[in-house]
Structures are given as C-alpha cells and as structure tokens.
C-alpha cells in the first residue's frame, strides 16, 4: 500500500459524450470516486467527429481531460504523463487500441492495466482472431487486467490468455445524481439502451409483445440507432437519446424498468449493466432477462424480477401489488448504495493498483524486463 494519492492516466473511449456508448457513465462515476478519495486522474480521449458533435460533458470538474488526434500525438504530447504516472489504464474500444496500448507499454514506468468494459465481446473477438482494440500478445505484458465481467471469466483470462492478474471492476453509479425523484408515474415499463441486434429479440419479447397484449398500458424505449423499419406498438413511446442528466427523471417516471443484456454477456454471466445500478439507485423496480450471476448481485423476487417470456412481464404489470413493487425498489437501492457506487468502485481500483505498486517496489522494477 502506498498510502499516498496516486497519479493515474486513463485512455478511454469517451468521457465527454455518452451518446451511443455506456463507457462515459462508467468512467464518470469511477473518476468522481477517485477524486473524492484524493487521487489525480488525467483522462485522454481520442478526438473523433461522432463524440465531438454529441458532447454532454465537455469540461469535467473531477479530472483533467485532454483530447488527442492520433497515436503519434498521444506519444508526442502526452508521453511524459504516461511515463511518470503511477498507473496507466487503457480501456476497451479505444480507437487504434492495439497501437495505443503498445505505446503505453513502451513508455509507462508505473503499473500498466487494461480496463475491459466489454469483456465477453473482447474474448469473443480474440477467439475469432480479431484484434480490434487489444492484441492477444499484449495481455501477458499487462500488470493488471481489469474486467467488467467477474465470475469464471477471470480464470479464463488468466488461464487461457496468460494475464498476470485479472481483477473484477464492474461499472458503478453516482448516488448524488441517481436517486429517487418523486415524479408521478408516466410509463408502466421502460427501457434505456442503444440499439443492438443481439438485444432486439429480447426487447421484442419482454417489452414490445407485452405492449401489444396490454394496449391500455404505457411503455417507452429510449436510445439511439434503432432501425427505421421497427414497427413500434402505438402505446410505446420512443425517445432518441437521453443524456445522463435526464436518466433519473426517466427512471423515476416508470413503474418498472427493463434490463436487457448483450448476447456475449449473457453467455459469460457476471456482467451487470450500468443501467441496473442506475435504476436501482433511482428506486425504480427492475425486471431483467436472465444470466448467470444476476441473482447473486440482486436476489430474485427480493431485489429484482427475472423474466423469460412475454407472459412473465404481462403478469408482473397486471398482478404486482404496490407494496411488493416498493419493496423490490427498496431492496435494490440498498444493494447499489452499499456496494456499487463510484466511490466503492474507486476503492477497489486503488486497492489493486496499490498492491501491484508495492509488488513492483519489492521487485525493484524487474518486471519491466519482461516487457
């Protein structure tokens, strides 16, 4: 344990824009937690047109932010920061991620880690020999592999891919921003998520079909990139995009909110979406598709409702007593506030970094020779 504030550099997909990605909200909660604990963070974001046109947090007040134009500029402009940091983390889906991580491995003198917010997707890509943002050869050179997914996947990362140490680091939520609003109910069931082809069949089964069966009920789907040919039932409202600042109000107007999980994450299990923690913190009862590890995080029928078929959702909306609905919400909120805040996640990150730094100090930097 260093017992001192850490100097951390994080190269991530996006901090400034939450449009079409779940990375920004994950980074925001984590970095605010790190600042609250007294640590200094520099976030480096590739300046790309998509996020430049849709920035909802251009000037964060909890870290230093720098935009860079390419790998060459990353090295020339920020090489000193990468070299001098106690730890450098490179996130998943960073543009030219393999080259970015190679640069970091070359110049950084502190801990080098990969933060995989898309672990099941990453592993599926590597199995297909697709090295879009992480190369297989880089994994054994990392000091730490932080994984959005916990459970048995951690053993696979170490055993099959040769990671020195795989550590779970789930997403988290900011309780100061995500909390009950007391707003009147507007929708019986809602969903917040960017369109994904592998999620769409579940959304169809657990929201659109129940909407057709319950024409007197109100539903909502918020998120970008949905194809124009989707036939939305008349009682399903569409919202193209909601910035994080509007999420609490959105959750607060739902009787229940739906969580739908990507196919690779369902298969891997132990991959909670940030939407679970956001809704829980806002006191909105959650109904979710099923996957391994879900009910270990949120006990079934106590803090969450697991739905497999359309009839499960119809029954939930038609038959759940208000007392039961409120109890579900209270239990989920207690779990989130107890273990899944940005500050809690920051403590987990710092503990892993400090133990690795202590090991490096005992080894007198010998691990660098392996790189």
Image (cartoon, rainbow, N blue to C red):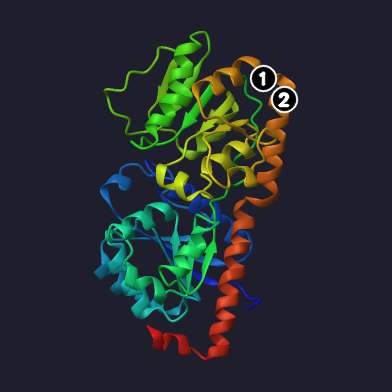
The image shows residue 314 at horizontal and vertical percentages of 55, 18
In the rendered structure, the answer to whether residue 343 lies left or right of residue 85 reads right
Q: Nearer the viewer, residue 85 or 193?
A: 193
Give the residue displayed 50% in from the left and 50% down from the top: 26
Give the image quarter of residue 107.
Answer: bottom left
Q: Residues within 10 Å of mark 2 (few under 14, many from 20)?
A: few
Mark 2, secondary structure of its residue: helix
Give the residue displayed 33% in from the left and 64% down from the top: 134
In the rendered structure, the answer to whether residue 46 lies left or right of residue 346 reads left
The image shows residue 144 at horizontal and vertical percentages of 49, 71
Quadrant position of the N terminus in the picture: bottom right
| Residue at numbered disc 2 | 324
Query: How many numbered marks does the figure carry?
Result: 2
| Cβ atoms at labels 2 and 1 below 8 Å apart | yes
Asked whether residue 85 appears in the rendered view, the answer is yes
Quadrant position of the C terminus in the picture: bottom left
Asked whether residue 118 appears in the rendered view, the answer is no
* Disc number for residue 285: none
* Disc number for residue 320: 1
The image shows residue 118 at horizontal and vertical percentages of 42, 53
Q: Is residue 82 positioned above or below 279 on the image?
A: below
Give the residue displayed 40% in from the left and 77% down from the top: 141
- The Cα–Cα distance between marks 2 and 1, rounded to whole angstroms, is 7 Å
Q: Nearer the viewer, residue 155 or 242?
A: 155
The image shows residue 202 at horizontal and vertical percentages of 43, 31
Q: Is residue 3 positioned above or below 249 on the image?
A: below
Q: Residues within 10 Å of mark 1 (few under 14, many from 20)?
A: few
Mark 1, secondary structure of its residue: loop
In the rendered structure, the answer to whether residue 184 lies left or right of residue 28 reads right
């Amino acid at each position: 344990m260093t017992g001192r504030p850490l100097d951390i550099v994080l190269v991530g997909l996006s901090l400034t824009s939450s449009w079409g990605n779940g990375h920004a909200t994950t980074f925001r909660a984590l970095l605010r937690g790190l600042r609250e604990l007294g640590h200094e963070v520099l976030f480096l974001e590739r300046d790309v047109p998509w996020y430049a046109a849709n920035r909802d947090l251009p000037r964060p007040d909890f870290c230093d932010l720098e935009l860079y134009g390419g790998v060459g500029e990353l090295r020339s402009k920020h090489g000193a920061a990468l070299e001098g940091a106690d730890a450098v983390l490179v996130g998943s889906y960073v543009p030219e991620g393999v080259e970015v991580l190679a640069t970091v491995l070359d110049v950084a003198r502190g801990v080098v880690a990969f933060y995989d917010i898309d672990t099941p997707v990453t592993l599926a890509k590597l199995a297909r020999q697709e090295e879009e943002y992480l190369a297989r050869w880089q994994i054994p050179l990392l000091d730490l592999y932080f994984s959005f997914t916990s459970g048995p996947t951690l053993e696979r990362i170490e055993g099959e891919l040769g990671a020195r140490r795989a550590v779970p680091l789930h997403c988290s939520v900011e309780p100061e921003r995500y909390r009950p609003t007391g707003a009147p109910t507007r929708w019986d069931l809602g969903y917040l998520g960017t369109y994904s082809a592998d999620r769409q069949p579940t959304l169809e089964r657990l929201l659109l079909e129940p909407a057709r069966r319950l024409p007197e009920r109100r539903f909502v789907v918020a998120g970008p990139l949905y194809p124009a040919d989707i036939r939305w039932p008349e009682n399903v409202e569409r919202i193209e995009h909601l910035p994080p600042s509007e999420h609490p109000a959105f959750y607060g107007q739902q009787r229940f909110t739906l969580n739908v999980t990507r196919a690779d994450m369902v298969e891997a299990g132990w991959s909670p979406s940030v939407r679970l923690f956001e809704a829980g913190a806002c006191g909105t009862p959650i109904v979710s598709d099923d996957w391994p590890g879900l009910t270990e995080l949120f006990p079934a029928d106590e803090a969450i409702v697991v739905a497999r078929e359309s009839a499960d959702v119809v029954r939930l909306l038609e038959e759940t007593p208000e007392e039961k609905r409120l109890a579900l919400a209270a239990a989920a909120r207690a779990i989130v506030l107890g273990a899944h805040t940005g500050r809690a996640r920051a403590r987990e990150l710092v503990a892993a970094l400090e133990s690795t730094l202590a090991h490096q100090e005992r080894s007198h930097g010998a691990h660098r020779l392996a790189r």
